[in-house]
Structures are given as structure tokens and as C-alpha cells.
Amino acid sequence: MNSSSPPVFQEEREQILQAVAMFEGLVEANPQDCQSLEILKEAYQRLGLSEETLRTAQKLGAAYQELGQLSLAMLEWEGVLQLAPGNLEVIAALSDLQRRLQGEPVPQNGGEPQGVGSDLAAGGGGAQSVARPERSVLMETARTLSPESSSGVDAGVPRAAAVLPDGNEALAKFLTQHRLLDADLIASTLEWVQSANARVSPHQCAVSLLGELAKRGAADMETLLCGILDRSKCAYIPLECYEVDRQVVKMLPESLTLGRLIVPFDLMSRTLMVATPNPLDAAGRQAAQQMLDYHIQWHLASPVAITKVLEEVYRISK
């Protein structure tokens, strides 16, 4: 990302704001949820909200540091320092982390500097625009899932091991937070889905957390979809009633369509309409946006309908 974000269309802005509301809730429930903090930071950048981006980057650096992920904390604090140059608290945090990474003794008062969790925006002063850090979740996802890289994946390596987290964990947290289903059932189903997707062979559809919850009788699919729609305000598409052009589907690589159940289903002018069973799969959504030079409209759809489309497009036998 350069000195300014690309223009955001009104509909896309509304979608980003909806995502912000969801992930702010997740972070409030778990301040050390680094994945949600990353997504929030990216969303604030996209909206051009400099102070919110800076504050979230600061929280992310502190969370990485508290979790002992020092290399990631170092990269995050360096990004914060670019936005708030000369901030003594950030400089002190970086100095402390460097000593730890090099195995040097840390002074007794050299842990997390006092006030490192405070708002750094006041100290930064001059951040009028927000630059995308080099370690961007979006760019890393795009590189990982690009057609060139996905075509070179060894067929003997499980496909799920070659991509970033698929958003099922974020969806599970969302379902739990809004008490749509029993928390223990969600957790056990999530564990099973993650294990199943790690074993999915190439050219086969990934397993959907939503679909598996419905199969286990936790709730019928319509109830689950309505619960997500009511709380996320995401658009819905009855994909089973839609005639999908297979060439439109193939505008994205299999690592996204089959691996994350993300399905482009219609193209109108410069707007591409895409269906997903998981509106919280931020990494997949951002990877799709990075690969395509179109304005994307995202729609929630039944995982059963999505899987059926993919099986027909790629001629996959059940």
C-alpha cells in the first residue's frame, strides 16, 4: 500500500464497516486475538482511518510481545514507528525486543516500557496518511494463494498446509460470541473441520464449518444463515437458484475456490459478485481482491450450494 489507500466505493465501504464491527467485538472479547487485530488494522487502513490504524497496530505489537512472538512484535513495532516517528515509548519497546532476540540480558526495568499500551497517536503527531506495512496480511495472502504459487505446490503436500488460516476459527468465535450455538459443539466441530481440511486432496472441495454444524444437527442451515445475516448485515445470494458461468468461477485459482469455497458467480461491468459460506474469511477475501482488478461484491451463500457449483464446474465426483 502506498501513501494513500485505493478509493473505496460506498458499497465496499459499508461491507468493510460491517467487518470492523464484527472484529471489534472479537478483539474486545479477546485482546490477544492477533488474527482479528491484523484484520482490523487492514480494514482501518482501507478506510483511511489513520488514528485507528495506529492504535490497532500498537495493540497488535503489544499482543505479539505478550504472547512471546518477539519477531512478529519487532516487525509490528517497526511499522508503528514509521507512523509515529520519534516516539520514545516505541523506540524503547524496539530496543528491549532487540536485546531479547539477540539473547542479551534485559534490564530489571527493561520489560515492556511504561505506557507502551497507551495511545501512540498523540506521540506520533504527523501521520496524515497510512502506508501499508511490507508484512501486510493481504499481500502475504495474495502471494501465497496466487495462481503461480498454487500451481507449484507439491501434490504430496496437503493443500491446507500451503495457505493461511481459512477463517473458520474467526467464524467459530463469531458464532460463539453471538451465542448462535453451543460453544463446546462449535469448538469440537471446528477441530474436526480443521483436521479434515488438512487432509483434503488437491481438486477436492474443502469442508465448511457451517455445513458441518448443520450436518451434526446443531441447527438447520437456514437458521444458521439467518443468524449470520442478522448480525453481520452481509448480502445473501440463493446460489442454488442461480445459473453460474463456469468461466466466471475460474477467474480465481482452485486454492481459493476449492480451498476456501469462494465462488465468483456473476460479472457485471467492473463488478464481480462472489459467494462465500464464511463472511469472516478476511484473508481469503483480501487475497481475491488482490488477484482481481474488479470491484467485488460479497454475498453469503449456503455451503451446500457453493459445493454443488464447484463440483459441477470442476467435474468433481462426490
Image: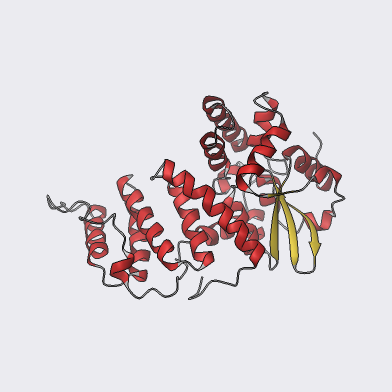
Q: Residue at x 69, y 33 (%)?
A: 223
Q: Residue furthest left?
A: 108
Quadrant assignment for the C terminus? top right
Work out whether 90 lies above or below 106: below
In terms of depth relative to the viewer, which is nearer, 42 or 230?
A: 230
Regarding residue 200, the answer to whether it shows in the image is: no
Q: Residue at x 66, y 50 (%)?
A: 234
Locate residue 50, reporting x and y percent.
43, 68
Q: How many marks?
A: 0
Work out whether 188 lies above or below 264: above
Q: Residue at x 78, y 45 (%)?
A: 310
In terms of depth relative to the viewer, which is nearer, 107 or 146?
A: 107
Regarding residue 90, the answer to whether it shows in the image is: yes
* Side (left or right) of 90 relative to 37: left
Locate residue 205, reporting x and y percent.
71, 40
Locate residue 168, reporting x and y percent.
58, 40
In terms of depth relative to the viewer, which is nearer, 305 or 16?
A: 16
In terms of depth relative to the viewer, which is nearer, 204 or 3?
A: 3
* Side (left or right) of 64 relative to 145: left
Locate residue 253, reporting x and y percent.
70, 55
